[in-house]
Amino acid sequence: MAPLGIIAGLGALPVQVAEAATARGQGVYVLRLKGFEEPDLERFPGEVGGIAEIGKAFKAFRQAGCEQICFAGVVKRPDFKALKPDLKGMSLLPKAISVARKGDDALLTFMIKVFEDEGFEIVGANEAAGHLEAPEGVLAGPEPSAEQIQDLKKAAHVALEIGRLDIGQGAIVANGLVLCVEAQEGTDEMLKRCADLPLTIRGSETARLGVLVKRPKPQQERRIDLPTIGKKTLDGAAAAGLAGIGYEAGGALIVDVETVKSHAEALGLFLYGFPQDWDT
């Protein structure tokens, strides 16, 4: 079995993808992106490469015998002026800058096509590590109340609509009031903003209120950048006084699911998976 090539950013997701591939005997070759090197990935075969060193990436994966490539981990949108491309990267940079103006989804789709045009098969993290795919129903914590279900449905609808506009993948609703939507800052920073809101409109540790919902943008390429939920997400939700987190079943990844489940139980938060067509 050819090793899985992983283009890796920060976080536990690329680590778990690498562990899953290794466990099934596939093996991995990890390209850790410069500036976003996850320390725990150093134990796997691979190297560090710049975001715009595309030719270097092609050569490394071919020499390692990789046929499939998985993009995983947190990588912030680069400052294109600060990039140091190799020859292949330089030839692609004008097009990358052009499509980036259309939004993150357009840029990610462009990068997938670049690798596919070179003969690589792109696989999603949910394919490479199927145990991370978030299931439907209550995964942890108490069953959401009728009021919380209504908040979940509204937050799911808001997240869908901001996704259509390529703004973000998450929204927070409490008692029917939209408290925050996710943009370029990401989920963790959105939760910090929510925690700074007045207690009159949000919950607290002793009286939890409201929900966070994460779901893919409807037009996005699902082989890359699926929403993820980990311990840090739970901690942020707890600090914001939320009662739970909802996600689109099959459209989100739970990083280290058993740890996340036990942590949610300890914090008193629910995790709830809803179907893709729930709000239509």
Image (cartoon, rainbow, N blue to C red):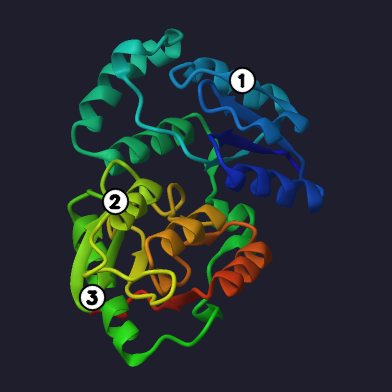
Which residue occupies 36% across, 74% down?
Answer: 276
Q: Nearer the viewer, mark 2 or mark 1?
A: 2
Left or right relative to 51: residue 264:
right
Q: Note whether 102 is above or below 261 in the view shown.
A: above
Please tell me how crowded label 3 is: few (under 14), some (14-19), or many (20+) other residues with Cα within 10 Å: many
Q: Classify residue 96 by image quadrant.
A: top left
Q: Which residue is mark 3?
A: 154
Tag 1, which secondary structure?
Answer: strand
Residue 121 location (% of width, % of height): 54, 42
Mark 1 → mark 3, Cα distance in angstroms: 42 Å
Amino acid at circle 1: Val
Tag 3, which secondary structure?
Answer: helix
Mark sitting on residue 48: 1
Tag 2, which secondary structure?
Answer: helix
Please tell me how crowded label 1 is: few (under 14), some (14-19), or many (20+) other residues with Cα within 10 Å: some
Q: Which residue is mark 2?
A: 193
Left or right relative to 254: residue 17:
right
Amino acid at circle 2: Arg
Nearest the viewer among 139 and 72 is: 139
Residue 140 location (% of width, % of height): 56, 77
The quarter of the image holding the C terminus is bottom left
Q: Earlier in the sequence, mark 1 or mark 3?
A: 1
Which residue occupies 67% across, 49% down?
Answer: 16
Q: Earlier in the sequence, mark 2 or mark 3?
A: 3
Left or right relative to 64: residue 154:
left
Amino acid at circle 3: Lys
Q: Earlier in the sequence, mark 2 or mark 1?
A: 1
Nearest the viewer among 26 and 204 is: 204
Mark 2 → mark 3, Cα distance in angstroms: 19 Å
